Image (cartoon, rainbow, N blue to C red):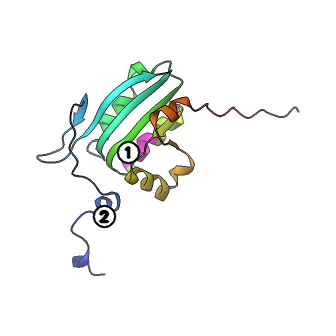
Amino acid sequence: MPLRDWPSEPLGRALFGGHNQRMSSVQESSQTGPGRPRAAVAARYVQDGAYVVVVEGELDLDTVEVLRAAFDDPERQGSVCTVADVSGVTFADSTALNVLLQVHADRDLRLASPSEGVRRLLRVSGADAVLRTYASVPEAVADTPPAPPIDPPV
């Protein structure tokens, strides 16, 4: 296909869609240019021992620091797990996926209510085999972490 026949919309946006959603009442946000949608951490709280981060908007190279900062919040200390409510994420790229995988490597990360774009990113990248997803925040919080394997006697 000649270059001129490619869609005018960036391929990532075409695959993951929905990048025009606006957010309201956020704690932290990242505005990356005039008229460009923001990424935001709409809420951070502790529920039944789980540190919950509610994320909305686009997560890409320009906005992912908002996500990284939310996961590094000292409030999460002592939590049994971290739950990311990603139902409001309208776009996510490999930069966001990298942050999620780094958090997962450091602690028990659970993704709640992933949007279609997030589910597609996880599936296409193979990260769905690594990152656990749940239908809701309460379901993610209530899940008992898997027991560590028991080493057989030698």
Other residues around mark 1 within 10 Å, as few (<14) / some (14–19) / many (≥20): many
Magenta stretch bounds: 95-100
As helix, strand or loop, the secondary structure at mark 2 comes to helix
Q: Which of 5 and 136 is in front in this view?
A: 136
Of label 2 and label 1, which has the lower sequence position?
2
The residue to which callout 2 is attached is 11
Q: Is residue 96 magenta?
A: yes
Q: Quadrant of residue 8?
A: bottom left
Q: Which residue is drawn at 43% across and 54% down?
A: 121
Q: Indicate left or right for 127 with 1 as reference.
A: right
Disc 2 to disc 1, C-alpha distance: 17 Å
Q: How many labels does the image show?
A: 2
Q: Residue at x 47, y 52 (%)?
A: 122
Other residues around mark 2 within 10 Å, as few (<14) / some (14–19) / many (≥20): few
The residue to which callout 1 is attached is 96
Amino acid on which disc 2 is placed: Leu
Amino acid on which disc 1 is placed: Ala
